[in-house]
Amino acid sequence: FSTTATHIQRNPAYSVLNSDDVSYFKSILGDSGVVQDEDRVAVANVDWMGKYRGASQLLLLPKSTTEVSKILSYCNSRRLAVVPQGGNTGLVGGSVPVYDEVIVSLVGMDKIISFDNVNGILTCEAGCVLENLSTFVENEGFIMPLDLGAKGSCHIGGNISTNAGGLRFIRYGSLHGNVLGLEVVLANGTVLDMLSTLRKDNTGYDLKHLFIARRNLGEILSAFEFMDHHCIDLAMKHLEGVQNPLPASPYKFYVLIETTGSDESYDKAKLEAFLLRSMEDGLVADGVIAQDISQASNFWRIREGISEASVKVGAVYKYDLSIPVEKLYDIVEEMRIRVEVLGYGHLGDGNLHLNILSSKYDESVLAQIEPFVYEWTSAQRGSISAEHGLGLMKAEKIHYSKSPEAVSLSMVS
Ligand code: MLT
Ligand code: ZN
């Protein structure tokens, strides 16, 4: 077979393709999804440099996750070797067969499924060409965190599977850090649903407007924290030496924004302009900018001291949830009907800290909270543990955020 792979022996445990296999693939993909034409298969057998060449006889073109799952399940049971292929722009011979593997090309899975233009979350199929995704999000006023020379041909699935670095790494970091969720088909055909994408929905408080800060402050925004007035009241009551920077304010929500740029006067002017514009637009009712480090520390003391202030009440039931930002406060309001609640957290990450206050830890209080909070979060496809971990408290609750397949995979890995 391949001249470039002579140092690797074909594993005799793998079967050789036969006509029954081809008939089965036609039954699930139709004739157009099963390519045996020599010229077309030849193109898929070789990488773009002409350096690595396999000898596959069959190219499959699935159009859905279900089809990919059926292909892999069948190949697994028949012990047929498979190579997945995207844009075939790789430089290390990873996207072409070495011997006679069945080529499963994702070229037919190139649909953009949704775009959440509040949170900047794109959901798409693995076969989308990077440049098409860039053009799409740029038209929405966003940017892909990845750019590379092969963008006109490479697929996002291949980019993610290789954790491609590219030209924007210095600014946006690793691609994996930018991927929120995945739907994966394992080699045995099992579909692993880890698509924890947070979808847009317009019900509830319009907290999403606060997210406009992210776009306006862009590169200098370093923290975007929110707290409801219950948090401020509690902090003022229980924390020593802190002052409310907006003492006359009967406002419902507060946001603490921190910017960290390289030019102090430019950053300050940008923040001032943002605050002014937000007040003119009615997005922000009142605000104050820290004039020195000690004032800034006072602001942070209020935010960071909420946890400390809350334990002074007695018992605190803590829930650390990831929820679509538009719905972030709905659960606080729902719970407030039953119990005393604080709502605060890292708004920039869609991370709510739902704290329920009680004079003591009590089974009857817990029964009012759980499993409701977990069920509600799960229904939003949120996470029941955004940043605190599962621990003893949530070890048995993982199924609210992860599919049975993902849980069993973590057990064996
Ligand atoms: C915080 O953001 O303040 C911490 O995660 C602790 C907490 O949830 O209270
Ligand atoms: Zn936190």
Image: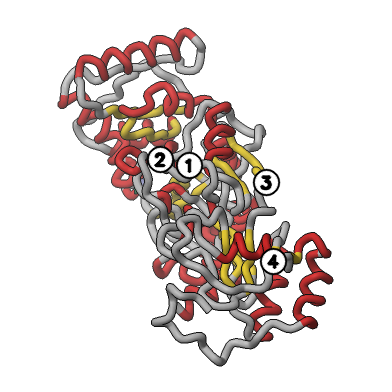
Query: Which residue is drawn at the image coordinates 53% and 29% (left, top)?
Result: 138
As drawn, the label of residue 111 is: 3
**The residue under label 4 is which amino acid type?**
Glu
Residue underneath mark 1: 350
Residue name at image x 47 percent, y 8 percent: 280
- Label 2 CB sits under 8 Å from any ligand 2 atom: yes
Residue 302 at x, y = what percent?
29, 34
Give the residue displayed 33% in from the left and 34% down from the top.
223
Disc 1, SS: loop
Instruction: Name the front one of labels 1 and 4.
Output: 4
In the image, taking residue 267 as reference, residue 251 lies left or right, namely right
SS under mark 4: helix
Kindly identify the amino acid type of the residue bearing the numbered disc 1: Gly
Q: Amino acid type of disc 2?
A: His
Image quadrant in which the C terminus is located: bottom left
Q: Indicate which disc residue 38 carries.
A: 4
Question: Between marks 3 and 4, how big is the CA–CA gap?
Answer: 28 Å
- Determine crowd level at label 2: few under 14, some 14-19, many 20+ residues with C-alpha closer than 10 A: some
- Point out the frontmost of discs 3 and 4: 4
